[in-house]
Amino acid sequence: MKPLRIKGLTKEYRIGLSRRSVMALDHLDLEIEEGEVFGFLGHNGAGKTTTIKLLMGFVYPTAGEAWILDRSIQDVGVKQYIGFLPESPFFYEYLTAEEFLVFYGQLFGMGGLRLAKKIDELLELVSMTDARHRPLRKFSKGMLQRIGIAQALINDPKLVILDEPMSGLDPIGRRDVRDIILRLKHEGKTIFFSSHILPDVEMICDRIGILVKGRLKAVGTVQELAGASSVTSIELVVEGLSEAALAGVGGLATTLIRRGDHVLIKLDDGEKVNGLLDQILKHKGRVLSLLPHKRSLEDLFLTESGMNRT
Amino acid sequence: MKRILVIALNTFKENLRDKILFNLVFFGLMLIGISVLLGSLTIGEQAKIMKDLGLASINVFGVLIAIFVGIGLVSKEIEKRTIYTIIAKPIPRYQFLLGRYSGLALTLFVNTGIMAVGFILVLLVGSVGLDIGLMQAIGLIFLELLLIVAVAIMFSTFTTPTLSATFTLAIYVIGHLTGDLKALGDRLDDPLVSGVLNVFYYVLPTLAKFNVKSEAAQGVPISWSYFLVTVSYGVAYAASVMVAACMIFQRRDFK
């Protein structure tokens, strides 16, 4: 039983008086495995949010089907097993954090001690126990995102769908969300989230899918998509090398920049790094840093999108 | 059913925290104004004018809330995107709509109830006799409010708040004139125009039926059979409008 199966899902919008057709999503086929973190990547307008809206039943598909835990998405009952956080969420700002979670819990038919216990647990998870009696109106963006995640988890979902959970957050907020996602994965939940913030995706996703103009262009692990020889160049900073030693090392390097005692060495071939290190150590040099430059997901993303940065 | 109640109570809470009941302050001031006025009137006129103005105020405040809160019940949720988190839960769309409706109905019930109590107290202080006709009049005002909220919600399931308000107000005004439309249609020779007016008469709500304020003010209670027929008419009309609203709401996309 796959947590999520999508087959030929298509959404065509008719815009304006002329009823001009816009293909927001074009025959999407996708399967998500149990327990994985799947990153759904694409530029704004690529169709990520449309896909999620289709899955959640906010809009109806023009064609195609999708199943969550082997039940059609048209079946309202399947939502019992889904946790969902919309993009830049707006909530009932007149409610306090606790009332907010009680409300959503009740929509799942929860109540009493079980709900109270779950709420304590979730407030703890998103580090908001102190804010439980504060109205949402007074929350910062990061706090809203965290309480939004808490409401998505109130029913202990099997599949968690998050739409741009990290957009608009500061680095600390992004780290918090990332940690929560990893913790959910650890608990055995399947997570499907959309994003255009690549480093976050690179770090936490088991697999990614890249959506360009409504079409799925690539699916796979980060390593698969980025390629095996993903290291494109290496930068080293060393100190304590004599002039003679530098002359020897310089033969291997592409670029050599000296700043006082420190020397920055660039290599454009990852294979040469061992030889270089041998040389440095032989001449009693000290390596201060070593930084491999990888072909990042961002490069991949731009290649797939047909928008190379040059 | 339980989920409708959860939505309804949350809507009621929202109304309270949006300070909608604040209108009661103005109603209170109005009552004080009426009492002050009374001193300058002759004994015979006092009771009638007091009842007239009181009932009219209850009606006006209720209608304002029904229309302006009613049009926001659904459209505000879509606009602020709060609806996403609700529809994402295992609750059918029609239950959400019925919950929102019931929540505002509860707000209006409490609001009308408080106004009614205040009104009765002022009458008692002014030693004006009470009669069942007043209760009937207030009951029918409340029913009219339920009908207006249904119309407001129906419009707000498919159009903007501004247009919803315009349409609902228009229906409210025309709804009070349907009797005149029919009389006019019957007198015209042009079959097309009189036909259109007749359609209006039958399709639009006959809101004048709910207006028994002048009877109540004059101390002439309406018959119970009229009361019951009117109540049934109001309930049936509001229910049909809500069915239409649910059907529209079920089909639409939340972009």
Image (cartoon, rainbow, N blue to C red):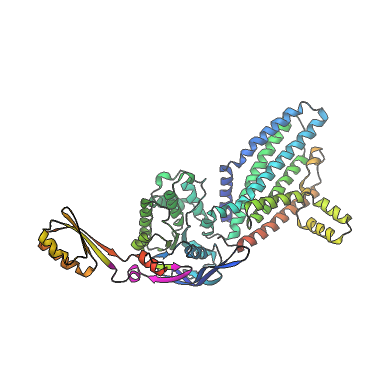
Provide residue A299's location: percent of width, then percent of height.
36, 66
Number of marks? 0
Whether residue A276 sits left or right of residue A54 in the image: it is left
The answer to whether A66 is drawn above or below residue A91 in the figure is below
- Evaluate whether residue A269 shows in this view: yes
Q: Which residues are magenta?
A: A211-231
Quarter of the image with the C terminus of chain B is bottom right
Q: Residue at x 45, y 50 (%)?
A: A144
- The picture places residue B114, in percent across and down from the top left corner, at 66, 39
Q: Is residue A203 magenta?
A: no
Q: Quadrant of residue B138?
A: top right
x 74%, y 41%: residue: B135
Q: Which residue ends up furthest to the top in the rendered image?
A: B39
> Is B152 situated left or right of A210 in this image?
right
- Is the N terminus of chain B in the top left, top right, bottom left or bottom right quadrant? bottom right
Q: Position of residue B162 (x, y in %)?
A: 64, 51
The residue drawn where x is 76% and y is 26% is B39
On screen, residue B56 above or below A108: above
Does B61 sit above or below residue A103? Answer: above
Q: In terms of depth relative to the viewer, which is nearer, B214 or A41?
A: A41
Which residue occupies the foreground of this view, B83 or A186? B83
In this view of the protein, which residue sits in the foreground, B33 or A227? A227
Residue B130 seen in the figure? no
> How far across and down, in percent of the image, does residue B191 sit?
86, 61
Which residue shows up at 49% across the image and 49% down it? A100
Left/right of residue B151 with respect to residue A49 in the rendered view: right
